[in-house]
Amino acid sequence: MSYGTTFPLWRAAAGHHWPAYTEHAFVAGLGDGTLPQDAFLHYLRQDYVFLIHFSRAWALAVAKGETVAEMRHCAATVHALIDHELSLHIDICARAGISEDELFATEERIENLAYTRFVLDAGHSGDFLDLMAALAPCVMGYGEIGARLLAAGGDGPYRQWIETYGGDDYQEVCQAAGALIDGAVARRLGDDPTASPRWASLCNRFTTATRLEVGFWDMGLRP
């Protein structure tokens, strides 16, 4: 997937952790339909809570933005997460007899707590770039996973999930996020960001978030 120029560099810096995330057994089960339904529903409940904190992190990015364009993009992302992406979880779980009140009352697993608080801390303790590096694995990783699974057929019990993240709308989200990050990096680090003293720490934030994504899939397989 081509989501700008910064993301591929961060993805490469993550090394083996990236395929451990995007080619995880949970992902394979989504693709071929062998993932047990109880594991999928357990994941959706945790991901519903995750997305609430993810929305808060993007709201924090509005405050961290240095331009109106950055603020506008992040505010629109908050709207999309709350009013659209959460609907996928609500819809699928409702068909399984799980209400939105039950989703909201889901007790967070440790893996969920670790990931969401890491992202929020990146924003509170760092700047806009620190927050983008922590947010990017989820945004772009799901786009990459969805596109690959959809291209492979995407049929089966998890087709709605695959079409959501592999479809044109979400792919445009990933491309826009890539452009946002590229612009933010150029604005703050200049034309050669890899030479910046900050580059290694940004790569490390991205890699840590990627490792936490692996842990989230691991958790999904242990309902």
Image (cartoon, rainbow, N blue to C red):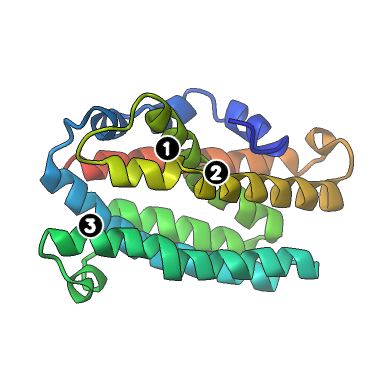
Check the image and report above or below for 211 versus 55: above
> CB of mark 1 within 8 Å of CB of mark 2?
yes
Check the image and report above or below for 42 versus 83: above
Determine which of the numbered discs, if any, sits on residue 171 in the image. 2
- Identify the residue under disc 3: 92
Disc 1 marks a residue whose amino acid type is Gly
Which residue is rendered at x = 10% and y = 64% of the image?
97
Pointer 3 local density, CA inside 10 Å: few below 14, some 14–19, many at least 20: some
Check the image and report above or below for 70 versus 190: below
SS assignment at label 1: helix
Instruction: Compare marks 1 and 2 and give the one earlier in the sequence.
Output: 1
Disc 2 marks a residue whose amino acid type is Gln
SS assignment at label 3: helix
Q: Quadrant of residue 218?
A: top left
Q: CA distance from mark 2 to mark 3?
A: 21 Å
- Identify the residue under disc 1: 146
Image location (x, y in percent) of residue 110:
28, 55
Disc 3 marks a residue whose amino acid type is Ile
Taking the image as drawn, is residue 222 in sight? yes
Pointer 2 local density, CA inside 10 Å: few below 14, some 14–19, many at least 20: many
Image location (x, y in percent) of residue 120:
51, 63
> Can you say which quadrant of the picture contains the N terminus?
top right
Q: Quadrant of residue 99?
A: bottom left
Which residue is rendered at x = 41% and y = 60% of the image?
85
Using residue 45 as the reference point, say whether residue 144 is left or right of it.
right
